[in-house]
Image (cartoon, coloured by chain):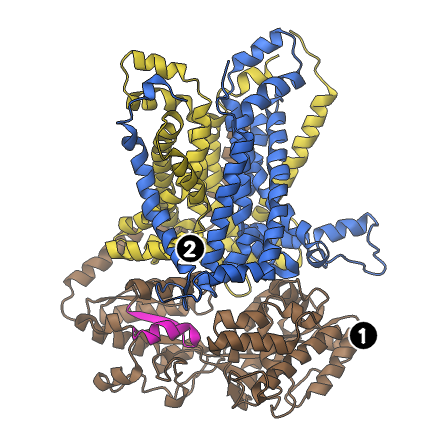
Chain colours: A brown, B yellow, C blue
Amino acid sequence: MKKKLAVLLAGLMAVSMAACGNTSDTASTPTDTSTDTATESTSDSGSTGGVTIQVTTTYAGEDSNAQNYKDAVAAWEAKTGNKVEDSSATSDETFKSRVITDFEAGSEPDVLFYFDGVDSNQFVEQGKVVSIDEIRQTYPDYASNMKDDMLPESPADGVKYAVPVNGYWEGMFVNKAVCQAAGVEVPDANTTWDEFLEDCQKIKDAGYTPIAASLQEVPHYWFEYTIYNHQDAKTHATVPGSTDDEYGQAWVAGLNDIKGLYEKGYFPENTLTAKDAETFELFTGGKAAFLVDGSWKVGGIESAVDNIDDFTVTHVPGEGNRKTTDEIGGLSMGYYITRKGYDDAEKQAALVDFVSYMTSDEVVSKFAGTSVTALKNGAEPDMTGATSLAQAALEYSNSITAVSPAVQDNLSEAARAPIFGDMASIVQGTVTPEDAVTEVLTLASE
Amino acid sequence: MKKKKFSPGLLIAYIVLIFWALTTIFPLAWSIMNSFKDKKIIYQNSFSLPVGAAFSMDNYRNIFQNYNVLSAYRNSFIISGTVAFAVILFAGMAAYALTRYKFPGKKMLTGLLYAGMMFPVFSTIIPVLRMQASWGIVNTPYVPLNLLSVILPQIAGNMSFAIIVLSNYIQSIPIELEEAASMEGCSPQKIYFKIVRPLCRPSFVTVGIFSFLWSYNDLFTQMFFLRTKDNWAITILLNNIASKEGVNYGALFSSVTLIVIPVLLVYLVLNKYIIKGMTVGAVKG
Amino acid sequence: MDAKIYRSKKILPFFLAPAFILMFVYLYYPFVQNILNSFMHIKYIGTSGGEWNQPFFENYVKMFRDPKMGIALKNTLIMIFWTIVGQVGIALVLALLVTNIKKGRGFFRTVFFFPIVISATALGLLFNLVFLYDKGMVNQVLQFMGILDVSTNELIDWKSAHPIFTMMLPVVWQYVGFYFVILLTGLSGIPSELYEAAMIDGATRLQLVRYITLPLLRNSICTCIVLAVTGALKVFDLPWTMFVNGMSNTWLTGTYMYSKVYTDVDYASAIAVVIVILGVVLSFAVNHVFKQKDDYAV
């Protein structure tokens, strides 16, 4: 029996390896030789590069730009003769703590592509990264192709460190087939919040779920937009001073809106226990009409549905001072050069050249697709062969009238917890919105 | 002695065993099944069979074309093999000493053992990273050094469990054999290696299997110490493929399959040592 | 045990040093750091030092008043009960059955091991689908059996209606195979002569189990219970993938600590200390209750 099983398992493995036939061989066996040649070329190329730099980014795994990144790095290596030691990984909590600990242990990389919000505070405060201004003293052209006022400022000291690549926006994806079945028009730039509520009721009455959202796992999209509806693009990203001030009241009002949506039954019945993937499935499977999510979801929807023409993306209906076309978006990540790498005279020029290359008009255009960039010349995405959803995404992003960064990026993970980790208690009424906001603000002020 | 071919007790035994087997086979079969399906089809129905148009090798093709899977397997086996071997060696010695010798502070060491099993890896990883970075074995250009930086904490992490299981087993070995050997002039080292170890082989194999398995599946430590692609172990490689925005189920299941199969092979190969001796008496008759 | 041959202790360091040096460097020393952290105010993960809390045991006071910690402890106690009864109990039954059959023994030994090798992510996903609200396996079966009314589309949201059951079942199930293997190892140490002798005396199968197997397996069972109790205190991965952020009041000590690791570093350290203390105390207690001093006497 054991033997049979062993043979079976071995067979399975063989099948899975054979699946890739020759490619697996070419991909795997000659690696040793390829690394050998790489080291050789670095050792004997005294003329141009010959520098090895350590780079950490989040362009890895399923990131839609992972391949673009690989290609760009290879191109830069070929161009300069330098070598990139790449330790990119999927961005999650483990990755973040590894990056932070590396700074603590003095084993940080030379170049880091990382978040520019509060996540960067620690190494910024400790002076472990070099500001753009300082680099410009020696290399005046550094990041000169970017709009200066769109370069993100560190929340810790207001200084600019990171050179951004591709940004993001958050918008409302719509399952047009569901809208049609419920006799509701697809919302557009003119749809108001009240009209949206009426639509939701019609969709619910027709037996569909109006809004696909897991308040348990990803409540932040709705949090951002509902409080945005009580503010405007200029004030949205401000963390309130107290629950009673204008901004604090906006937060409370926004949370009450979410509570209202929940009580009216516009979210999925199990929104407090469902996973994001589960509610996403409601949306793609034709059971829910709306999904508020980020620009990165375009690819996810494309690969999850059969008829992409049933889907589009539009603005989240607004009220008050927020126009429906005012959106959440921004450049939440960028390239940092670390102090350790910059102070290494041998590496300095190569590091600056690497970041300049990775943030050049050409490379950024390729990475950005339909999303926001800080380029002076704007990005020129290549839309040949794009799906109707991707086209809609481009139109959407072009019709945005004002952009505000997400306020959650100005809150630490710990401070967010009382709202994001406990939305169930808020919508069920065991915790009042006021108390939750107060708790968040107390943690944020620590 | 002739026995009835069939008894109600035996029937019940088989029913229970088969029922449990179904629950344990199902998830694995389900994972392997879904690994041959496109993520769209998994979304629609994860319990359907991958036949006809639903069958797809794309998940595997994607992995093997884009990543150096064999190098990752090699790294995994180097790491986990070394960990299992070192744990068996050191934990066995310690377990022997703890069961056979009486000495002051023994109770305290036992307490430390239990504690060692409880330490969450999250609370030890950061000091360990700092320590190893200061020794210069983290983030080096040399693959073996980087692998070592995973191996050492993993050996320590599996030690408590191993010592506890092994000392329990050593305790049940009759001491008379050791006394006899001692009379013939054997040193304790010799007694341990020549008598105790062979006698306890099943438990050493068990401990080896679990140390191997835990080291192999320990994504967290690997994420901290294996950064660049040529250092990657299989778990970290496949995690990098499968975990990202929206979760690509197809990639996830092909990853699970690729991770699980080698471990099951190891288990199958070593399993017979666990069982040796056990079957003889219990089934005769 | 104080056998003559083990009176001389000169050799002791040779046996003990390698294991314990490694553990001191990689476990105990880092954990001392963790204990210190639990008394301090730490802003970011990875930073050490900083200021002492005022009073220094602030985190421990906080824990006493923290309702979530209370929920976590209560759930963990329930979990401990089920791991002992469920995991070790089922594993024992399965191990005894497997040794008493002839055909298919190798098969069962192999397949019972399957759940342990599959990652928590994949299992979490599977059980999410099994207990899924709409089109989940359990709900479909119940509808098919007529327990749930199909005409009104009656469904059970397992994660909010029966959260504790839905969380614990997968965990208990997954680790049965682990204890099964450990118990098999213990069984392999029982000399077959004992059974043969008893059978010549006309003992039945049940009597063999009752009077030979179980008493001689006592140490192994004790080890299993220690492992089960400590395991229940620290388990977090599978529950976490199914019940993120302790939803529906499903906190366990392990998941609660994990939820604080990145956001409230010093508090997480304090919870870790409490988990370790509970683990050590309970392990000693189990040993005290179950273990015989000298259990091998033929």
Question: Which residue is found at the position 34% from the left and 76% from the top?
Answer: A125
Q: Nearer the viewer, residue B116 or B280?
A: B116
Q: Above or below — where is A407 with respect to B157?
A: below
Name the mark nearer the viewer: 2 or 1: 2
Q: Is residue C82 left or right of residue B273?
A: right
Q: Position of residue A205 (x, y in %)?
A: 81, 74
Q: Position of residue A23 (x, y in %)?
A: 40, 53
Residue carrying label 1: A205
Residue type, mark 2 in image? Ser
Q: Do callouts 2 and 1 point to residues on the same chain? A: no
Chain for disc number 1: A
The reply to whether the magenta stretch includes residue C189 is: no
Furthest toward the right, the residue is: C151
Q: Spatial distance from mark 2 to mark 1, Cα to Cα?
A: 51 Å
Residue A359 appears in view: yes
Q: Residues within 10 Å of mark 2 (few under 14, many from 20)?
A: many
Marker disc for residue B123: 2
* Callout 2–callout 1 Cβ contact below 8 Å: no
Tell me the SS state at disc 1: helix
Start-end of magenta stretch: A110-128
Q: Position of residue B237 (x, y in %)?
A: 42, 54
| Quarter of the rendering containing residue C134 | bottom right
Furthest toward the bottom, the residue is: A321
